[in-house]
Image (cartoon, rainbow, N blue to C red):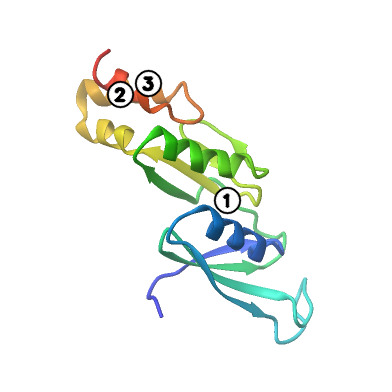
């Protein structure tokens, strides 16, 4: 058993979300589906209560807790990408499956979970500091999905 597991609260859709994540991201899978042993507030005996899954090797539990606590941008998965193709693949999978675009590499899946699809070129430019970081940051602020080539040009001063 892991010492730390992320617990994500869903409104009866934990299994659907976990199956999507397992299909979409490498090193991701659904490990177990646990059903309620008895009736509970908002659910009945036998309903899916929790789903154990991993996203990029990170252990998670989806809890079907009901509509009381919706997801917010206060929590997000940040996915580091190497290329525009990889960035596009994850962005399009999330947004194209009922999700929505946001700004600066952020999007939400159809269950309301926030994702940051962040090319390493952006992270590296920000870590470099100075003018390189300032130019990359300014370019990023104009984007929804991150454009790797545009970040490279901005960071390089071009």
Classify mark 2: helix, strand or loop. Answer: helix
Q: Nearer the viewer, mark 3 or mark 1?
A: 3
- Residue that carries the numbered disc 2 in the rendered image: 152
Say which residue appears at 51% left-offset and 31% top-offset. Answer: 103
Task: Point out the frontmost of discs 1 and 2.
Answer: 2
The front one of 116 and 56 is 56
Q: Is residue 61 left or right of residue 140?
A: right
Say which label, 1 or 2, has the lower sequence index: 1
The N terminus is located in which quarter? bottom left
Q: Secondary structure at mark 3?
A: helix
Q: Position of residue 15 (x, y in %)?
A: 65, 66
Q: Are marks 2 and 3 in contact (CB under 8 Å)?
A: yes
Q: Residues within 10 Å of mark 2 (few under 14, many from 20)?
A: some
Residue 22 point in image, percent of width and height:
53, 60
User: Alpha carbon of mark 1 to alpha carbon of mark 2: how far?
Assistant: 29 Å
Q: How far is disc 3 from disc 1 in space, using C-alphas? A: 27 Å
Where 142 falls versus 15 (above or below)? Answer: above
Q: Secondary structure at mark 1?
A: loop
* Distance between the alpha carbons at the discs numbered 2 and 3: 5 Å
Relative depth, front residue between 27 and 63: 27
Q: Residues within 10 Å of mark 1 (few under 14, many from 20)?
A: many
- Mark 3 = which residue? 150
Q: Which residue is mark 1?
A: 113
């Amino acid at each position: 058993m892991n010492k730390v597991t992320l617990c994500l609260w869903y409104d009866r859709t934990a299994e659907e979300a976990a199956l999507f994540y397992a299909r979409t991201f490498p090193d991701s899978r659904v490990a177990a589906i646990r059903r309620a042993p008895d009736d509970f507030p908002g659910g009945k005996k036998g309903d899916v209560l929790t789903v154990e899954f991993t996203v990029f090797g990170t252990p998670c539990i989806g809890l079907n807790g009901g509509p009381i606590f919706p997801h917010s941008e206060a929590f997000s998965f940040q996915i580091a990408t190497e290329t525009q193709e990889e960035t596009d693949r994850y962005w399009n999978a999330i947004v194209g499956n009922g999700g929505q675009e946001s700004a600066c590499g952020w999007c939400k899946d159809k269950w309301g979970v926030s994702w940051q699809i962040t090319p390493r070129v952006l992270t590296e430019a920000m870590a470099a500091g100075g003018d390189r970081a300032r130019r990359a940051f300014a370019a990023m602020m104009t984007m929804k999905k991150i454009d790797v080539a545009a970040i490279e040009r901005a960071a390089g001063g071009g």
